[in-house]
Image (spheres, rainbow, N blue to C red):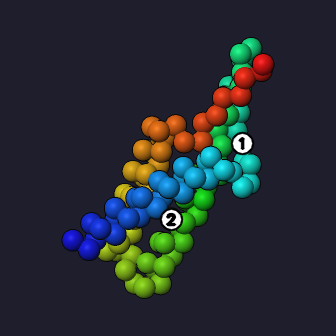
Amino acid sequence: MKKVVTTILQFLLFLILFGAFSLFPPFHIEHVLGSSASGTRIFIADGLLLALAVYLFIVLIEFLMKRLRAMAPLTTIAFVFAAIVGFLMKFGFLTRTSF
């Protein structure tokens, strides 16, 4: 039961980081996905990269606590699921019109 709660909380942490730092990007890491006469489609990678950094930090802590085999797969599942849900919710995608 403890592992399930930890995994759900990690999922929420990654999803909130992805969403918050996609809306308020501190580093302004932007990739142009497409350009047309009506506007430009941009992906802001700050939220995803910060969620990835927190994921790696959590895995490092699990490694130092010698809990890597038990908790790292669940942390990875939480991160991947949060990334998928974030992409489905269009976190980080921005359209700038030329008007």
- Element carrying mark 1: strand
Residue 23 on image: x %, y %: 62, 46
Q: Which residue is mark 1?
A: 30
Classify the position of the C terminus by image quarter.
top right
Q: Which label sits on residue 55?
A: 2
Q: Residue furthest bottom?
A: 65
Residue 81 appears in view? yes
Camera-nearest residue between 19 and 29: 19
Instruction: Name the residue: 50% across, 65% down.
Output: 55
Classify the position of the N terminus by image quarter.
bottom left
Residue 5 on image: x %, y %: 29, 68
Q: Residue furthest top?
A: 37
Amino acid on which disc 2 is placed = Tyr
Instruction: Name the residue: 58% across, 52% down.
Output: 20
Residue 87 on image: x %, y %: 49, 40
Camera-nearest residue between 12 and 70: 12
Amino acid on which disc 1 is placed = Glu
Alpha carbon separation for disc pair 1 and 2: 21 Å
Category of crowding for the residue at label 1, using alpha-carbon neighbours closer than 10 angstroms: few (below 14), some (14–19), many (at least 20): some
Q: Are marks 1 and 2 in contact (CB under 8 Å)?
A: no
Above or below 43: residue 27: below
Above or below 85: residue 2: below
Q: Which label sits on residue 58?
A: none
Residue 74 appears in view? no
Instruction: Name the residue: 34% across, 64% down.
Output: 7
Category of crowding for the residue at label 2, using alpha-carbon neighbours closer than 10 angstroms: few (below 14), some (14–19), many (at least 20): many
Q: Residue furthest left?
A: 1
Left or right of 23: which side holds 55? left
